[in-house]
Image: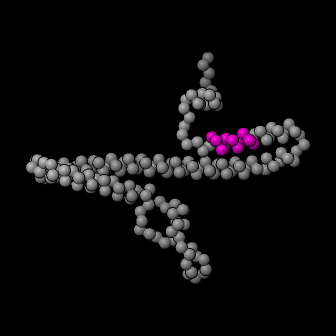
């Protein structure tokens, strides 16, 4: 599935009927995250596995078993390896897509919350109530800290760290 970035990288400006019409050139290049790429890599690994196994049999034990049976066994093992590689590559592709989606959501949430906080933080200067100004300023600073430190976290916290923070409690009491 082409992304906006990949489309704009391949885009060229050409003069057609009106100036500055953006045309997208289609290329035959397979994107690294596509299913066709995963299948191609898996088939390539299977083929290389088959060829290496056949070469090893030819060099090390050329007279081992019947030739057709040996080819069938090597072909089956290469097919199994191809399936395993394809499955692992698919799992990796899905996890990568989820990670990219999560990063996009984090960036978007960060952007919208900061935009919403801007008028609030600017309104603090307009009020004469010092206590209200201090409370609003502290809340804005706390939200800014959370957006900067917590939202983009890449690895989960350990249980000990979660217990120290205290806001991960499930609401169940030990009574």
Q: Where is 151 relative to 39, above or below? A: above
Question: Foreground residue, 9 or 169?
Answer: 9
Judged left or right of residue 145, residue 68 is: left
Q: Name the residue: 66% across, 44% down.
A: 147
Q: Find residue 108 and report its horizontal and vertical position in percent.
A: 63, 51
**Residue 67 included in the magenta stretch of the image:** no
Residue 72 showing in the rendered view: no
Q: Name the residue: 42% across, 65% down.
A: 29
Magenta stretch secondary structure, dominant: helix
Residue 98 showing in the rendered view: yes
Image label count:
0
Q: Find residue 92 and report its horizontal and vertical position in percent.
A: 43, 48
Q: Where is 137 relative to 164, above or below? A: below
Q: In the displayed orientation, state which residue is furthest to the top.
A: 175
**Residue 149 included in the magenta stretch of the image:** yes
Judged left or right of residue 29, residue 169 is: right
Magenta segment boundaries in residue numbering: 140-150
Q: Name the residue: 80% across, 41% down.
A: 136
Q: Find residue 11 and report its horizontal and vertical position in percent.
A: 53, 70
Quadrant of the frame with the C terminus: top right
Q: Find residue 26 and report its horizontal and vertical position in percent.
A: 46, 70
Q: Where is 72 relative to 10, above or below? A: above
Q: In the displayed orientation, state which residue is furthest to the right.
A: 128
Q: In the displayed orientation, state which residue is furthest to the bottom.
A: 17
Q: Name the residue: 26% across, 52% down.
A: 49
Judged left or right of residue 57, residue 11 is: right
């Amino acid at each position: 599935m082409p992304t906006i970035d990949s489309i704009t990288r391949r885009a060229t400006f050409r003069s057609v009927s009106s100036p500055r019409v953006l045309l997208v050139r289609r290329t035959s290049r397979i994107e690294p995250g596509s299913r066709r790429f995963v299948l191609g890599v898996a088939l390539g690994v299977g083929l290389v596995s088959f060829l290496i196994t056949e070469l090893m049999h030819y060099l090390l034990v050329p007279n081992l078993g019947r030739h057709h049976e040996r080819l069938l066994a090597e072909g089956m093992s290469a097919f199994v390896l191809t399936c395993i590689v394809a499955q692992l590559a698919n799992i990796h592709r899905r996890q990568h897509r989820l990670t990219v989606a999560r990063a996009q959501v984090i960036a978007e949430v960060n952007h919208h919350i900061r935009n919403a906080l801007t008028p609030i933080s600017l309104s603090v200067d307009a009020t004469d109530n010092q206590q209200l100004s201090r409370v609003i300023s502290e809340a804005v600073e706390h939200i800014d800290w959370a957006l900067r430190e917590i939202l983009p976290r890449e690895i989960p916290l350990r249980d000990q760290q979660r217990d120290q923070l205290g806001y991960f409690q499930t609401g169940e009491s030990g009574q």
